[in-house]
Amino acid sequence: MTVVERTRPSAVLFACSMNAVRSPMAEAIAKHLFNRKIYFQSAGVRPGGELDPFAVKVLEEIGLDISRHRPRTFDDIEDSNFDLIVTLAPEAHHKALDLTRTQAMDVEYWPTQDPQLASGSREQILESYRTVRDGLMRRIKDRLGWSPQAHD
């Protein structure tokens, strides 16, 4: 077991505002990269979001399918035994810090732009989603010590 594997969390929750774009993208990428070596889940602070079709599209471009994902809130998560909560939006960060008052878990804030705020042509909007996707991919690989042989 490498040093990275010893310090790597065994359960990670990705959190954003409504679990419709950023956190489901992060969850899908992480599950793909770590192939069940780490338990991943995602949630939002507020209910009411629908899965964003642009998020589905940019993940399809890299071979990942999130079309069956249903947005959920922190309250919908049954297993809350996470070692790490990665927050992608300020609102989610405040909620996660609130949880740490009663549960022992680490919280990291990864400021991540909301691509739903992008404007312009369809291609310009998609490019904003790709930027978020690629940024999440890099952060997940770096933070969790991904290597090509680690995903088997």
Image: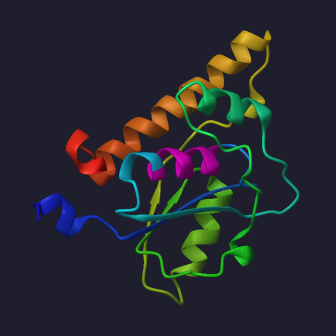
Q: Residue furthest left?
A: 2
Task: Point out residue 97 in the picture as x, y percentages from the top left corner.
Answer: 55, 73
Task: Point out residue 109 in the picture as x, y percentages from the top left corner.
Answer: 48, 55
Q: Residue furthest right?
A: 48
> Image point 43% across, 78% down: which residue?
105
Q: Could you tell whether 3 is left or right of 57 in the image?
A: left
> Image point 48% across, 29% down: which residue?
134
Residue 132 in the magenta stretch? The answer is no
Residue 23 in the magenta stretch? The answer is yes
Task: Point out residue 33 in the picture as x, y percentages from the top left corner.
Answer: 39, 46
Please give the count of numbered marks on the rendered protein: 0
Task: Point out residue 65 in the picture as x, y percentages from the top left corner.
Answer: 63, 40
> Image point 38% across, 64% down: which residue?
38
Q: Main secondary structure of the magenta part?
A: helix
Q: Residue furthest front?
A: 152
4 versus 22 height, above or below: below
Q: Quadrant of residue 10?
A: bottom left
124 versus 139 height, above or below: above
**Front position in the image: 117 or 20:** 20
12 versus 59 height, above or below: below
Q: Quadrant of residue 117?
A: top right
**Front position in the image: 49 or 148:** 148
User: Quarter of the image containing the N terminus?
Assistant: bottom left
> Image point 49% across, 82% down: which residue?
81
Q: Quadrant of residue 132?
A: top right
148 versus 76 height, above or below: above
**Magenta-colored span:** 22-31
